[in-house]
């Protein structure tokens, strides 16, 4: 979405959402130079924000305590494995895998987060440890595709079938015995 469209939407709605604000920031950060129209749109937005015609919706800060706990557990378990083997594990993948199998524990204040941390340590620590262990096992069993990994390219149906056939032959070379 362009800056002009975002400003137009904000003026129409009377609100500048965090997503709109983020998109304007992304555009400004990635553009080597803004056009006159973009500067004019930003000027209109600034004026509307100053007069109250447009209200910036504040970002609500949420803390997902489960993320903190799982990340800490993942780092601990990964460090133990990496210290004793030559494997390098992706902490982000492991954390995401475990988080997808655990309940979220959101809080909006530090007091609420402290309560959630204590509750999780008492009631969920064993489950957290188990899910991180499972995530690591899954990560260790995943094949290392390395640099030869290629995306399937778009083309006609014959091309796609040829790519799939080659892929299957690469990963299951002994699936069908070859005729002698």
Image: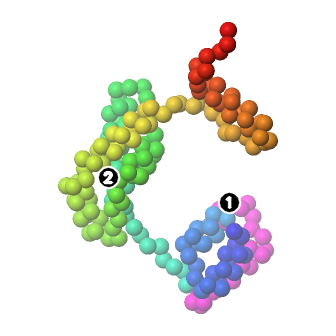
127 and 34: which is toward the camera: 127
Q: Please, what secondary structure does the residue beneath circle 2 have?
A: helix
Quadrant location of the N terminus in the rendered image = bottom right
What secondary structure predominates along the stretch shown in magenta? helix
Residue 178 seen anywhere in this rendered image of the structure: yes
Of pointers 1 and 2, the one earlier in the residue sequence? 1
35 and 166: which is toward the camera: 166
Residue drawn where x is 69% and y is 28% of the image: 166
- In the image, 32: left or right of 84? right
Percent of width and height locating residue 3: 70, 72
Contact between labelled residues 2 and 1, with CB atoms less than 8 Å apart: no
Mark count: 2
Foreground mark, 1 or 2, reads: 2
Boundaries of the magenta span: 28-54
Residue occupied by mark 2: 69
Residue 56, magenta (yes or no): no
Label 1 crowding class (10 Å Cα cut-off): few <14, some 14-19, many 20+?
few
Q: Please, what secondary structure does the residue beneath circle 1 have?
A: helix
């Amino acid at each position: 979405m362009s800056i002009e469209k975002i400003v137009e939407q904000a003026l129409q709605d009377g609100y500048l959402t965090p997503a709109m604000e983020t998109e304007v920031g992304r555009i400004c950060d990635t553009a080597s130079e803004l056009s006159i129209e973009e500067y004019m749109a930003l000027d209109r937005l600034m004026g509307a924000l100053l007069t109250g015609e447009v209200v910036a919706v504040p970002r609500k800060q949420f803390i997902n305590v489960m993320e903190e706990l799982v990340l800490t557990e993942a780092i601990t378990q990964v460090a133990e494995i990496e210290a004793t083997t030559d494997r390098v594990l992706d902490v982000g993948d492991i954390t995401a895998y475990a988080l997808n199998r655990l309940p979220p524990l959101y809080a909006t204040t530090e007091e609420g987060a402290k309560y959630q941390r204590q509750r999780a340590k008492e009631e969920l620590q064993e489950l957290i440890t188990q899910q991180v262990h499972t995530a690591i096992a899954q990560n260790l069993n995943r094949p290392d595709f390395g640099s030869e990994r290629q995306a399937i390219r778009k083309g006609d149906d014959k091309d796609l079938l040829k790519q799939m056939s080659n892929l299957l032959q690469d990963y299951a070379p002994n699936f069908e015995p070859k005729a002698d």
